Image (tube, rainbow, N blue to C red):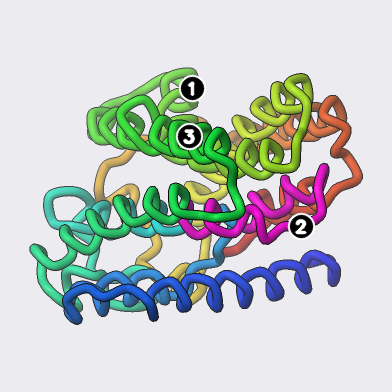
Amino acid sequence: MHKRLQAYLEFYREELQKAYTSCFDKLEIPANLKQSMLYSLDAGGKRLRPILLFASYEVYGQNVQKAMSSAIALEMIHTYSLIHDDLPAMDNDNYRRGMLTNHKKFDEATAILAGDALLTYSFELILSDSLLTSEEKVVLAKELAACSGPKGMVGGQILDMEAEKQSVSLEAMEEIHALKTGELIRFAIFAGAYLANATDEQLHYLKQYAYYLGLIFQVQDDILDVSGEEEKLGKPVGSDELNEKSTYPKLLGLDGAMEQKEKYVQKAYESLRSAGAEDSLLKALTDYFSQRDH
């Protein structure tokens, strides 16, 4: 990994840790609920979505603190989705990032409520941020709701479940993952650039970039489930096949999945060039998404 990118990732992971720890220190809620929420937030996440938000902001702006509440909110929603994904009624996973899943550490009811709490608290963070104007709060809350709700991530999760145990086309798979994985990435890219006053044209091309970046992330995730190392992944290799999920390697073969990923990478580069962000850290993050090993 490029040293500049590695330093960037480490710096903002620490900044996010400090910021959301401060949020929870002030939060007076039942102790077991707070413990469950923090358990999953602290479970070794790479913080890629909020870091994408910061990188998008820094293409056009400087005071990244203005984007902090949106970044924390995004990570909370991502974490809630993982808690619920791991439940017996969904993927029925026992481990996440090498640790017991939330419902195994606590219990199913607590895990469900912890996910609910992270989802709802995320909007409170944005709507109570004194650094944002009223218009910015409304725009961000609306976009986050759209990206995480029935027209976004949740809708994609339903399509993903419906695609289990059957063959789907490449176009159908792209639709599933553009929603399930890509919409939170789209929010990250949109929110950062929007808060830094990017133009409508720049936002248009960044939306295209986010679409391809979401697909890159998912293809690599599918590839790692076939060829990754269990110790690095923090979960068993082959869980997608065990759950009979539709994946890129299953549809295209491992080599075909790698070729398809490279097509998405080139499309992402083109979109960054059109947005005037080809020399930004977003390009380095694209390579990181494509080449990550966990």
* Circle 1 residue: 170
Which residue in the structure is indicated by mark 3? Answer: 138
1 or 2: tag closer to the N-terminus: 2
Does the magenta portion include 60? yes
89 relative position to 219: left or right: left
Q: Give 24 or 76, whichever is nearer the viewer.
A: 24
Tag in front: 3 or 1: 3
Q: Closest to the observer: 277 or 177?
A: 277
Question: Residue at horizontal 17%, vertical 68%?
Answer: 103
Q: From the image, tell me which residue sits under label 2.
A: 63
**Disc 1 or disc 2, which is closer to the eye?**
2
| Amino acid identity at mark 1 | Leu
Q: Is residue 167 magenta?
A: no
Residue 197: % across, % down: 75, 35
Q: Are marks 3 and 1 in contact (CB under 8 Å)?
A: no
Distance between the alpha carbons at the discs numbered 2 and 3: 20 Å
Residue occupying image coordinates x 85% and y 25%: 274
Taking depth in this image into account, of 193 and 66 the one nearest to the observer is 66
